[in-house]
Amino acid sequence: GEPLFRIHAEEEADLGFAWETPDLPTVSGDVFYRETADLIAWQPDETGLWWTPQNVDSQTVLGASVGLASGPFNAGYTYTDARQRKSEVVYSDWSTGEVRTAMVERRAASLPRHQVSLGFNVGVINLLARWVGDRAAYYPDYSGAPVVGMTEKVIPSVWVFDVRAQYELTRGFRFFAAVENLTDADAPAAFGNTAEDRDYPRAPRRFTLGAEMAF
């Protein structure tokens, strides 16, 4: 599934605002910065068969978001500039046991630069649209050993639409019908074990009917 992260040390700064007036849309925004040291990420090894904990020496994230809400409509956009610095194997001679590493800075793995959300509520109908920009991951390439390269793999950007309708029969009890991934978007949900595989598939369009009771 998605890489799992454990944070050892982190510095963070955040500055946000909100502007509300009776007759105009509500506008909100946020600017943030995070610097993380010794980030542990589960990533595939050079064989692609096993996921192992690998250290990302440092990661910096600089981003901004803006939101707009007016009546039944809301929208949001987030931009993230994330960079990672990691000690990577650049030379590995299995016959002599010689291994060389270098500190390499790259775009942070698995984090999209752009994200958009759109929501619309009218009556009993709720529509949610999400756009996630492309994401990158990196896989060691030992095909030219003893020189070791790095293969970059990208999951393309994708729109995902969900729709839900509900009817409250009595207070706290309602029926609902929902469709997830309405357009059957097929961009992978997460990176797989190797640069050549087809990654982890996104769940296809799914219909749900049910009832809920709140206490």
Image (cartoon, helix red, strand yellow):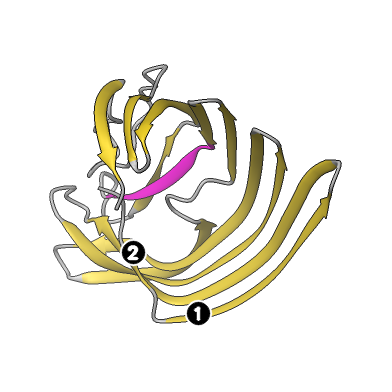
Name the dominant secondary structure of the magenta segment. Answer: strand
Q: Residue at x 50, y 63 (%)?
A: 84
Q: Which residue is mark 1?
A: 10
- Residue extending furthest toward the front: 170
**Left or right position of 211 against 111:** left
Q: Residue at x 20, y 62 (%)?
A: 52
Label 1 or label 2, whichever comes before in sequence order: 1
Provide residue 104's location: percent of width, then percent of height.
Answer: 49, 64
Q: Which residue is mark 2?
A: 89
* Residue 200 visible at all: no
Q: Nearer the viewer, residue 84 or 17?
A: 17
**How many neighbours does mark 1 have within 10 angstroms: few (below 14), some (14-19), or many (20 or more)?**
some
**Left or right position of 45 against 33:** left
- Three-letter amino acid code at the position of disc 2: Val
- Three-letter amino acid code at the position of disc 1: Glu
Provide residue 86's location: percent of width, then percent of height.
Answer: 43, 67
Q: Tell me, yes or no, whether the highlighted magenta stretch contains residue 136.
A: yes
Q: Which residues are magenta?
A: 132-141
Q: Tell me, yes or no, whether the highlighted magenta stretch contains residue 195.
A: no
Q: Nearer the viewer, mark 1 or mark 2?
A: 1
Q: Quadrant of residue 97?
A: bottom left
